[in-house]
Each structure stands twice: as structure tokens, then as C-alpha cells.
Image (cartoon, rainbow, N blue to C red):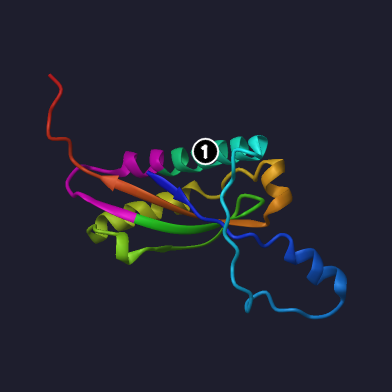
Amino acid sequence: MLSIRFKRVAAAVPLVLCSGNPMSLASQEPFYETPTSSDALYAQEYKDYVRTLRDKIENIAYKKYDATDVGTISLDFEVASDGNLIQYNVKDETTDASQKIIDIGLNALEQAAPFVPFPDAMAKRYSKLVFTIVLDFHVSQTKKK
């Protein structure tokens, strides 16, 4: 499962760069939005991008999983429009996993970076996005014969 949150910051950056007056973005409240069906091109690019991120991280994480532990890890991470990983952290309140599982999730995120750059429609709107991914590690109760 992958859920997404992202900050709209791109609109504030040109104002800071062009005005000549120093301005701090740190004191501004982040603005969150999600794509709507009214902007179909952007919404589809966004969905495709999220799928690409999720698949890349999951492929790495699940290949390293040896099925000796179970748990769920929730990761928040910020990606720049060029695909570089800016920062990340484990969401403790929604993570229920051993340190081994947490390490697998964090290592998968680090190895998956850098990601592909944002599609054009996303890059025009945002300089960075904040994502939350939940990785579930569970041993199957049934064996294939």
C-alpha cells in the first residue's frame, strides 16, 4: 500500500528568486493537495510516477526479506523534481516491526534512490514531493505444492 502527501512549494520559489527581498519559506504552512480527475493528464502522470516509486522500493525490499520476521514499516520521504532523495524517516506511530524489518525498508529506500525525475506536468507544479510508503512483511501461511 502506498499513500501520498505532497507539498506545493514551487509557486513560492519564483517569488523569492525574483523579488530581491529575502523571504523565509520555513515559517509558511505547507500546502497539501491531491490530483483531481479534472486535471486528467497530471493525475495520470502522478499515478504512473507513484507506481514507479512503489515498484522500485518494493522490489528491492522484498528481495532482501528472508521471511524470518513479520512486520509493517511506514516511511515518509521527500523527493526533489530531479528524482533525488532529499530526506526520509520512519513513522514510528504506524510502524510495527523489528529493527531487522526497519533496516530492510530503509536500505531499500536508500538503494532505490535516485528516482526518475518528475514528469513534465508534475515538475511544472512542484519542486519536491513528500511520499509515505507502507511496506508489509508477512510470512505466507500456505505453501504451494
Rate crowding at label 1 as few (under 14), some (14 to 19) or many (20 or more) other CA atoms within 10 Å. few
Is 86 placed above or below 117 here?
below
Image spot of residue 35 (x, y percent): 59, 45
Image spot of residue 23 (x, y percent): 75, 79
Is-magenta flag for residue 9?
Answer: no
Task: Kindly state the secondary structure of the residue where label 1 is placed.
Answer: helix
Residue at 34% over, 48% down: 135
Image spot of residue 6 (x, y percent): 56, 56
Q: How many marks?
A: 1
Residue at 56% over, 36% down: 48
Is 125 placed above or below 59 here?
below
Is 39 placed above or below 99 here?
above
Is 64 placed above or below 44 here?
below
Is-magenta flag for residue 61?
Answer: yes
User: Which amino acid type is shown beneath numbered disc 1?
Assistant: Thr
Relative depth, front residue between 96 and 15: 15
- In the displayed structure, does residue 24 sit left or right of residue 1? right
Relative depth, front residue between 139 and 45: 45
Quadrant assignment, res 63: top left
Residue at 17% over, 35% down: 140
- In the displayed structure, does residue 89 sit left or right of residue 30? left
- In the displayed structure, does residue 88 sit left or right of residue 46? left
Q: Quadrant of the C terminus?
A: top left
- Tell me the magenta residue range: 58-73
Circle 1 is placed at which residue position? 52
Residue at 81% over, 68% down: 15
Q: Quadrant of the N terminus?
A: top left
Q: Residue furthest top?
A: 145
Quadrant assignment, res 141: top left
